[in-house]
Amino acid sequence: MAEISKEAKIIFLINAIAAFLFAFFFLGIPEIYYDLVGGAYFSPVCWRQLGGMLLIFGIFAILALIRKEWEQVRIFWEFGIAFLIMLVCISIWTTAYGLFDYTLIVEIVLVVINIFFYIRERK
């Protein structure tokens, strides 16, 4: 089995940091975060559910970082990319309603670097 590269480990660490940061915003302080970014509608339950999903995403990024073999992390990474693409699609959809949020930029950057390094690692 092939071992994952140092670049892949860095990507997992970046994913984990971003996930834990936004999990804190959405799960821990949703009211304060809402006041900072605004929005048309605030539902603490929905924001905390997203925070919980991001917390799990961060935990799986750490698990992928700990694993050494490509076959052990491949499914984690594919799930992570799919999750990020879903977040981008939802953010684009809400932007169409005039609710632009800077997290869209962060999500797009994460999707691009994850896909780039996933393809590179797969070879």
Image (cartoon, rainbow, N blue to C red):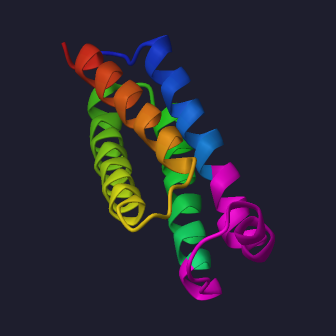
User: Bounds of the magenta span?
Assistant: 20-46
Q: Quadrant of the C terminus?
A: top left
Give the x, y percent position of residue 7.
Answer: 47, 14
- Residue 23 in the magenta stretch? The answer is yes
- Residue 76 in the magenta stretch? The answer is no
| Residue at the (49%, 26%) spot, across then down | 11
Give the x, y percent position of residue 45.
Answer: 59, 87
Q: Does residue 112 lie above or below 79 as drawn?
A: above
Is residue 1 visible in the rendered image? The answer is: no
| Residue at the (56%, 78%) spot, across then down | 40
Give the x, y percent position of residue 114.
Answer: 37, 30
Q: Residue furthest front?
A: 98
Give the x, y percent position of residue 18.
Answer: 61, 43
Task: Characterize the magenta stretch by its predominant secondary structure.
Answer: helix
Is residue 94 visible in the rendered image? The answer is: yes
Q: Quadrant of residue 120?
A: top left
Q: Residue furthest left?
A: 123
- In the image, is 101 to the left or to the right of 35? left
**Nearer the observer, 101 or 17:** 101
- In the image, is 5 to the left or to the right of 74? right
| Residue at the (29%, 17%) spot, across then down | 121
**Nearer the observer, 27 or 30:** 30
| Residue at the (22%, 20%) spot, across then down | 122
**Badge count:** 0
Q: Does residue 57 lie above or below 98 as drawn?
A: above
